[in-house]
Amino acid sequence: MDTLPAQNPKAHHNFTVDSINLLASTPPKHVSGPLSAVFGSASGFPELQFFLEPDGQHSINFDLRTTQLFKLGELQSLCVSEGSEIVKEKTYSKGITIQFKEEEESSSFHGAFEQWKSDVTIQGSTLPNGTISSSKSKFDDKIESSSAKMYFHYYGQLLHQQNMLQDYVRTGSYYAAVMENQADFAGRVVVDVGAGSGILSLFAAQAGAKHVYAVEASEMADYAQKLIAGNPILGQRITVIKGKVEDVELPEKADILISEPMGTLLVNERMLESYVIARDRFLVPNGKMFPTVGRIHMAPFSDEYLYVEVANKALFWQQQNYYGVDLTALHGTAFQGYFSQPVVDAFDPRLLVAPAVSHVINFTTIKEEDLYEIDVPLKFSASVGTRVHGLACWFDVLFNGSTVQRWLTTAPGAPTTHWYQLRCVLSQPIYVMPGQEITGRLHMIAHSAQSYTINLTMSAKMWGPGAEQGGILQTSSCRLDLKEPYYRMSQPQAYSVAQDQQPNQLLQSQDLQLPSLDDDGSDFIQPPSNDSTVHIH
C-alpha cells in the first residue's frame, strides 16, 4: 500500500494564490487574496481546499477523484469538479479560476496536483464506506466509454431493476440458495458485486451476515441506499459503496461473494470479468462464491417457422420499384444482416435434434483473461432426420452451498426467465439423417462494447455404410454480434413430438446430480453420460 502524499516529506501541499473567481455565481464572484490552497486527506479522500477567510471557517472543497485542473495562462488556471453541486435535484459541475502571483508558484501547484491525482491511495481502514482508486480503471481500459455510459444508465433505472426482481425464477432461486445455506453467511463478511437494487445484500443480511458491502457503479446505488435504509434492522449491517469493483477499496476482505453477473448466453455484458476481478481483489483464500459455476449448453435445432421468419425480413429489399427506386442491390447485405442477429426467445425443447453439449466455467478458478475468448468444439449425433437451422444455447449456474447445492437454469421447457434462450440461425441450413454426426465450433471473442462476436460453424459428416472413409458432406457458417440480438417474444409454436422421441429426451445434460465439492473445488462436475459431452474450461 502506497503512503499518502501528505505523509511524504517531498510532497508540497500548502500554496498561496492571489485570488479566485467562483464560476457558479452569476456573475462570477471574485474573492481577493492572498488565499490558502491546501492538498490533504483529512476527510478520508484526496481533496483540495481553498480557504476564503484567514480563520479557515469558510472554504471551497474539491474531491480530487473527480477534479481536473487546466492552465489558462502563465498565472491563471481553471479547476473543475464533475457533478459536485446539486441544485433542485439536478447535478452541476463546480468550477473556479485561480490567479497566481508568480509563475513558479503556479508550476509547483500544478505539479502537486498531478502528484496527488496519480499517487494517492486511500487506506481501506480509514474508509468504512469504501473509496474509488485514483488510478485508471481496468474496466475503462477495455470497455468503450459510450457502451459503459449506456450500460450504467440502463441499470440505474428502477423499471429495469423491477423487471429483474419480477423474474421470480431468478430472484426466488437466489433467495433459496442463500437461505438454504445460512451457515455460509452467518457471521461472515459478504461483498455483493454489482448490487443493483441491493436485494441480494438484504438476502445476505437476512441469512445472518456480519456485514455486507454492496458495490454498485450506477445511479442505482442511491436507490439501493434508500431501500436498505427502509429496512433498518437489516440495513445496519449493509454498507453501499458507489463505484466499480475494479476501482473501489474495502476495509476488509470478504468471506463470500454474491452477485448476479449473468447476461444473455451467460457472458453478455462481460460482467463475469468484474466478478472474477472482485474475487481476486476481495475474497479470502478458499472463500465462497454465489454463484460458483456456470455452464453454457448447446444443441442443434430445427425450426422452419423461425428460419422463414428471419429470411422474410429481407424481402423488403427485393422491391424493384420502391417509389421509383430499385432496392435489390442491398438485398444480399440485408439478408446476411438479419442472420447476424442471435434470436432471443423461449422455444419448445422438442425442436432440438441432438443431446446438448456443455461448456463449464468455474468462477472460483478461471482467470479474467480466459473470458476474452471462448472456444467450444461441437460434436453431436442427430436423433432425427431433418434440416438443422442452427445452434440453440442456454445456461445454468450452480450455487455450491455447504448445505444445499442449488441450480438456476434457463433451459427450454423450464420456467421462463428474463434471459430466455438464444439461437444462432444459419443462413444455409444443413440436412441430416438419424444417427448422422454433426460437428462444428462455437468461437466467441469479447469486444469493447461489453459483448462478444460469435463465429459458428456446423458441418454434417457422411453417414451410413462407408462413412468412415467419407469426409464433410455439408458446412454452414455465420458470424453474429451478441450485442445486437433479435428479441422474439412470441409464444413458441406447438410442435408434434418426433417419432420415437420423448419431449425432454434431449435435455438430459440439465439433470446432472453433483456430489459435494472437494476442498479445492476441482471434482464437482460428474463425468458426462454417453449421450452428452461437457467441456470444462
Image (cartoon, grey):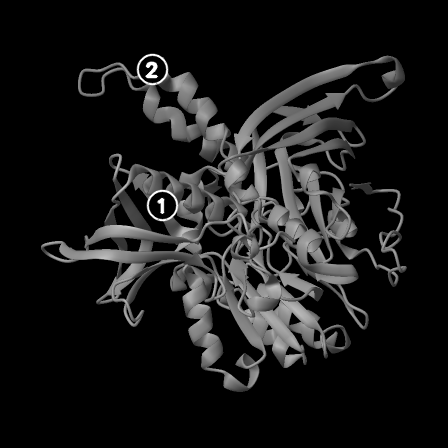
Q: Residue at x 78, y 51 (%)?
A: 508
Do residues under tags 1 and 2 come within 8 Å of each other at their CB atoms?
no
| Residue type, numbered disc 1 | Gln
Which mark is drawn over residue 136? none
Q: Residue at x 22, y 56 (%)?
A: 33
- Give above or below for 156 relative to 319: below
Residue holding disc 1: 68
Q: Element under label 2? A: helix
- In front here: 360 or 261? 261
Q: Give the side of residue 72 with respect to residue 63, left or right.
A: left
- In front here: 40 or 258? 40
Q: Residue furthest bottom?
A: 233
**Quarter holding residue 471:** top right
Which mark is drawn over residue 328? 2
The percent coordinates of residue 4 (x first, y second) are 56, 55
Dot 1, crowdedness within 10 Å: few (<14), some or many (≥20)? some
Dot 2, crowdedness within 10 Å: few (<14), some or many (≥20)? some
Note whether residue 427 is visible.
no
| Residue type, numbered disc 2 | Thr
